[in-house]
Image (cartoon, helix red, strand yellow):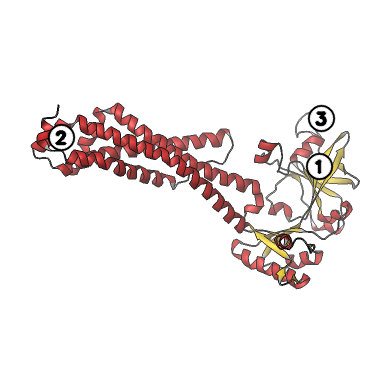
Amino acid sequence: MRIGFIATEAMDSLASNGRRSFLAALGLLVGVASVVCVIAAGQGLKGLILREMGSFSRPTHMTVTANYRYLSSIGWTKRPEPISAEDQEDIAAMADLVSGISPTAEFQFTSRYGDKSGVTRIMSVSADYFPMERLVLARGRSFNVTDDRNLRRAAILGAGIAEKFFGKPGSYGAEDPLGKRVSIGNFGEVEVVGVLEREPPSLFQAIQSYDSTNNGTVFVPFSAVGRFGGNRETYQLYVEASSENSVERAQEAILTLLSRNHGQWDGTPKYSVETGKSALSEIDSMTALVTSFVSAVAGLSLIVAGIGVMNVMLISVKERTREIGTRKALGARGAWIGRQFLVESLAVCVSGGVAGVFLAAAAATAVAHFASLPVSVPANTVPLSLGLSVAIAFAFGWLPARRASKLDPCEALRYE
């Protein structure tokens, strides 16, 4: 009964000074909204990095390369060894650990169709590359074993290069790319067997006019790498583990296989296998550090808001000195009066904190919608915001509450 009475008195007091209570809550609203927006921005930054990294951010993705870190440490006195076709076949045979494998080679050539031409990124890959990279065909087919076996001059076009050469589908004068032949440098002509769906613009394209998507890429079977001056060996191999639980075992098995086939450098493996798990761990550490630092800076606004709440409550204690003295003279205990002021402080802070969360969520939704950025408010920020609001209420409301509870009734009644 006493608690209900104290709460009622606190709400009546806040209502009678609505403008002042609103201004005090406004400070908490801005402070909490700032902290939550920073956390949401940190999550958005992480999502943006993961999106730009593509398959490299998946836990099951592995990249096999020469041990460049060791070569750098010894001043490049040794030369990296390529991954042979036999190595690739042995890794592909690990059916219980590996679900996909693709050697990669990248070139820059002038591609041409009719009177249209341009310098184009050429990627030599296997059929497994497309499901591993989550690339979806808009039309046509992917590569198959026959393309590699017969050294077929097949090609899959990115959406951008397809529109450049053949026009936007459905537009006047547009051609069907399938079956058409595109010239690539001195390599000759390749037959278009598929076209990829358009990928959304990358962050780098928006900032530096550099497109890291595959929209402008021409893909050819890896067997065709020999026609570009290379061979079936590669210095970079993409591997997909069969499951997240088998990543470590697959990593160890690949390193063991390559060491058996190629030996080691003074007890050091000649190859390294980087996994998506390690990349995710580094991204988590980096974004957490940045978010924590910026959140600490934004948290200063909460301290300022707390000081504002304390000042408002101290003014309230001073204005209600005679009221406090009268209530004490009629038998009210100092603890009851102190609790009332704490409840008032708590109501102001929590209402400001809740409003701040809603404001931050609205801002994050607007940014995600209009700027197409992966910004969202994590669910755990709601209890965090409420916890901060309650902590500020007790931390900065304690002094006014104590002052009110310790007022001498005689002195309070004589206060003008």
Residue 168 spot, x, y in % from top left: 76, 33
Q: Quadrant of residue 359?
A: top left
Q: Counting other residues with Cα less than 10 Å from the Cα at mark 1, is it few (<14), some (14-19), or many (20 or more)?
A: some
Looking at the image, residue 384 lies above or below residue 255: above
| Dot placed on the residue nearer the N-terminal end, 3 or 2 | 3
Which numbered tag is attached to residue 120? Answer: 1
Residue 282 spot, x, y in % from top left: 58, 54
Mark in front: 1 vs 3:
1
Amino acid carrying label 2: it is Ile
The C terminus, quarter of image: top left
341 lies left or right of 371: left
Q: Counting other residues with Cα less than 10 Å from the Cα at mark 2, is it few (<14), some (14-19), or many (20 or more)?
A: many
Looking at the image, residue 134 lies above or below residue 343: below
CB under 8 Å between callouts 2 and 1?
Answer: no
Which residue: 9% across, 35% down?
Answer: 410
Q: Residue furthest front?
A: 75
Observer-nearest residue: 175 or 291? 291
| Dot placed on the residue nearer the N-terminal end, 1 or 3 | 1
133 lies left or right of 318: right
Measured in 3D between alpha carbons, the distance from the residue under mark 1 to the one under mark 3, in whole angstroms, is: 23 Å
Which residue: 76% across, 68% down?
Answer: 90
Q: Quadrant of residue 98?
A: bottom right
335 lies left or right of 222: left
Q: Disc 2 marks which residue?
A: 324
Q: Quadrant of residue 368?
A: top right
CB under 8 Å between callouts 1 and 3?
Answer: no
Amino acid carrying label 3: it is Gly
Mark in front: 3 vs 2:
2
212 lies left or right of 9: right
